[in-house]
Image: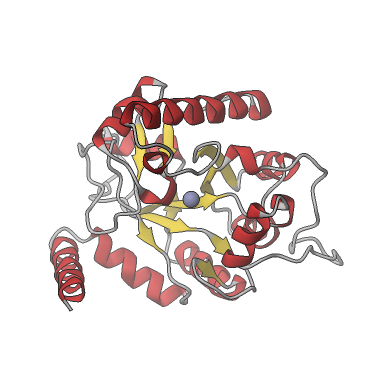
């Protein structure tokens, strides 16, 4: 290998769905994005390969890590068939307490299949709040099918997706709640899928130093944030992995965004400019 990756961009998705809304990429744009990555020779890493990259293992220059948060039904219905078609894989951070128990529903890659209706982001939240999470979220049968197909590997995004700092006024109680939530998530993954990893994604992107220590103590080592303005380079802390939120745009946009994210000189300048713009907005 002549060149190894300087930086591996980590892409963050939530929904791939025709139900327009926030945190949503349309199936057409997702297909275009994944096809563009494949056509340009990008390789989607496994979480383990990404961890090896951070530790200094030789990694192809055109590498990305594709991540999905929460575990929505549309990931199975619309994202899974596209990943399968292009032999790409993604990492799914699953809210383990919201996964359903019933049989797998049809997905869009099955000819003649009548795919289930999927909900937009706000509708999904409402369905979960009203006790109808199954309308919005994946079932274990679908999770296993994706894992077996090699399109998604599964890691923890907590059991309940709580902001634990808001669960009590007393910090010790919050930390106890956090420990319980993480332990429940790990036990559920172990029970349902037979394994649990060291990779973990913070709910709503929120974390504090004592949270990191608790999460490390129960077995997590790699922490995925919602912070975009930084680069994942060899030797950087696995406790703070940067992710780029993918917009509902086409493949050309994604290729350009990845180029900005990964470039040794342009990347840091771009991130500084983004931070400066954010600071201006905050002042306004
Ligand atoms: Zn989430």
- The way the protein has been coloured in the rendering is secondary structure
Residue pictured at 48% horizontal, 66% vertical: 39
The picture quadrant where one finds residue 176 is top left
The residue closer to the viewer here, 98 or 84, is 98
Residue pictured at 35% horizontal, 37% vertical: 169
**In the image, is 80 to the left or to the right of 164?**
right
Residue pictured at 43% horizontal, 39% vertical: 167
**Looking at the picture, does residue 1 appear above or below residue 247?**
above
The picture quadrant where one finds residue 230 is bottom left
The residue closer to the viewer here, 210 or 105, is 210
**Looking at the picture, does residue 252 appear above or below residue 66?**
below
- Residue 15 in the image: x percent, y percent? 56, 62
Numbered-mark total: 0
Residue 82 visible in the snapshot: no
- Residue 172 in the image: x percent, y percent? 34, 26
The residue closer to the viewer here, 61 or 192, is 192
Residue 128 visible in the snapshot: yes
- Residue 56 in the image: x percent, y percent? 25, 34
Quadrant that contains the N terminus: top left
Quadrant that contains the C terminus: bottom left
- Residue 203 in the image: x percent, y percent? 44, 46
**In the image, is 115 to the left or to the right of 203?**
right
Residue pictured at 56% horizontal, 40% vertical: 153
The picture quadrant where one finds residue 247 is bottom left
**Looking at the picture, does residue 114 appear above or below residue 92?**
below
The residue closer to the viewer here, 259 or 218, is 218
């Amino acid at each position: 290998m002549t060149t190894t990756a300087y930086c591996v961009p980590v892409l963050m998705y939530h929904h791939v769905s025709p139900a327009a809304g926030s945190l949503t990429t349309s199936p057409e744009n997702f297909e275009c994005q994944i096809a563009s990555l494949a056509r340009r020779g990008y390789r989607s890493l496994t979480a383990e390969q990404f961890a090896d990259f951070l530790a200094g293992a030789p990694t192809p220059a055109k590498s990305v890590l594709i991540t999905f948060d929460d575990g929505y039904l549309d990931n199975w219905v619309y994202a899974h068939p596209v990943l399968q078609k292009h032999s790409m894989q993604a990492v799914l951070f699953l809210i383990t307490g919201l996964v359903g128990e019933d049989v797998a529903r049809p997905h869009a890659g099955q000819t003649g299949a009548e795919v289930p209706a999927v909900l937009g982001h706000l509708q999904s939240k409402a369905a979960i709040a009203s006790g109808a999470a199954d309308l919005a979220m994946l079932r274990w049968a679908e999770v296993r099918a994706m894992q077996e197909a090699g399109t998604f590997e599964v890691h923890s995004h907590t059991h309940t997706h709580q902001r634990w700092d808001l669960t009590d006024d007393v910090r010790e109680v919050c930390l106890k709640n956090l420990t319980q939530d993480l332990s429940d998530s790990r036990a559920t993954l172990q029970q349902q899928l037979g394994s649990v990893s060291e990779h973990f994604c913070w709910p709503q992107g929120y974390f504090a130093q004592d949270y990191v220590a608790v999460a490390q103590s129960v077995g997590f080592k790699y922490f995925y944030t919602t912070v975009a303005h930084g680069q994942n380079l060899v030797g950087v802390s696995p406790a703070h992995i940067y992710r780029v939120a993918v917009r509902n745009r086409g493949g050309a946009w994604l290729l350009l965004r990845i180029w900005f994210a990964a470039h040794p000189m342009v990347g840091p300048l771009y991130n500084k400019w983004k931070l400066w713009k954010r600071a201006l907005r905050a002042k306004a």
